[in-house]
Structures are given as C-alpha cells and as structure tokens.
Amino acid sequence: MSTATTCATHLPAAPPAGAFVVRLAEPVEHDDVARLTVAAYTHDYDLHDEYLASLSQVAERAAEHDVWVAQDVAGGALVGTVTTPRPGGRLSPLARPGELDFRLLGVHPAARGRGVGALLTRHVVELARRRGYTRVVMNSGPLMVGAHRLYERLGFARMPEREDRVVPGGTLLAFGLDVTPVPGDAPR
C-alpha cells in the first residue's frame, strides 16, 4: 500500500510522502468515520437533520461502496474520508458509463490546510485511471465554495448541463475531470 496516490501529471503535486496514508476504512472505524464526516460538514454548513443522519450512515455505505480514510501516519488519527463505488458501480445518477463518481469528501476541521482534501481527491482520480474510467465526476452543494475551489484547483470543471437537482441553498453543482485510463490493479 502506498502512502500517497500518484495521479496524472496535470494535477498539482501531492503532499510530502509519508504524511498520510489513504486506505479503506475498517468496520471498527465506522463510528469514527461518521463523527469525522459530521464534524467536517457541520464546521462549515448549517445542515438539516436528515442530511446529518445520512452522513453518519458509514456502515450502510460501506456495505455497498468503498469508504476511504486518510490517516495521519505520525499520530494515527483519521483526518479525512471519501466514498467511491466499487468497480462497476456508481454512487449517484450523475455518473454515466465510463465515469467514476465520488461523494462525501470530508476533512476534519483540525486537519484542514494540510492537503488532505487534495490527497483524497487525487486518490479518487488515480483509482478511476487504474479502473479504466475516462472521467471523474461529483456533485457539490451550492454553498460548499471551499470544496469548489479545491476541485477547480485540481483541474475539475463545472458541468452545468448536468446541474438539474435543486437542494437547500440552490442547485446541486456538477464537476468533472477527464482522465487517461491506465488499466491495472486498482489501489486498495
């Protein structure tokens, strides 16, 4: 298992190797991942109870999808998380054939500014490339401007033609990044 995911050369450099490891969450960590996700989202956004409850359903997500965590190598703390579909699956109606979607990227407030969100996003991009996908897509809430800046900095572009869901605060935004597939063993 590598400590940092490598990606297409057009993405900005990854944080120093060894600072974090990205791996699948263990079942015994699901409650910790739920708390991390809720902390990440409630730090910046006023969310309704139904959405907060869905953020906490890590075990349910992990039964069908891959829940990844970023772990601080030095201290062992879980500092970030993201969910991807398993090979051949999808998380949302946004994903079309040949596209890998991801959801629920979250970084613990105490770990912000250390490149964790970018590392997890790069991990998703590399996962897509190794699985043979040609694009990575995701939805982001209209108020999540920090996330929008991250995605744009990493080369993602808005896809307004796919923005058709209205959520509290406006329309759910769609972002995509074209990638060059490099079939092989997917990072696990």
Image (cartoon, rainbow, N blue to C red):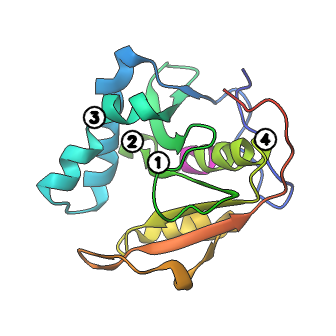
Q: Amino acid at mark 1?
A: Arg
Specify whether residue 70 is painted magenta: no
Using the numbered discs, state the Cα–Cα distance from disc 1 to disc 4 in whole angstroms.
28 Å
The prevailing secondary structure element of the residues shown in magenta is: helix
| 44 is higher (above) or lower (below) than 77 | below
Question: Earlier along the polypeptide chain: callout 3 or callout 4?
Answer: 3
Q: Residue at x 70, y 50 (%)?
A: 125
Which residue position is annotated with label 3?
35
Give the position of the N terminus as an image quadrant: top right
Q: Tell me whether the residue at label 1 lies in contact with that at label 4, contact meaning CB atoms closer than 8 angstroms.
A: no
Using the numbered discs, state the Cα–Cα distance from disc 2 to disc 3 in whole angstroms.
9 Å
Which residue position is annotated with label 2?
108
Which residue position is annotated with label 4?
130
Q: Tell me whether the residue at label 2 lies in contact with that at label 3, contact meaning CB atoms closer than 8 angstroms.
A: no
Residue 25: x percent and y percent?
47, 24
Q: Tell me whether the residue at label 1 lies in contact with that at label 2, contact meaning CB atoms closer than 8 angstroms.
A: yes
- Mark 2 neighbour class, 10 Å CA radius: few under 14, some 14 to 19, many 20 or more: many
Residue 62, by quadrant, is: top left
Q: Residue at x 20, y 60 (%)?
A: 47
Residue 136: x percent and y percent?
65, 58
Magenta segment boundaries in residue numbering: 115-119
Q: Secondary structure at mark 2?
A: loop
Question: Earlier along the polypeptide chain: callout 1 or callout 3?
Answer: 3
Specify whether residue 117 is painted magenta: yes
Q: Secondary structure at mark 4?
A: helix
Which residue position is annotated with label 1?
112
Question: Earlier along the polypeptide chain: callout 1 or callout 4?
Answer: 1
- Of circles 3 and 4, which is in front? 4
Q: Residue at x 39, y 17 (%)?
A: 27
| 134 is higher (above) or lower (below) than 106 | below
Using the numbered discs, state the Cα–Cα distance from disc 3 to disc 4 in whole angstroms.
30 Å
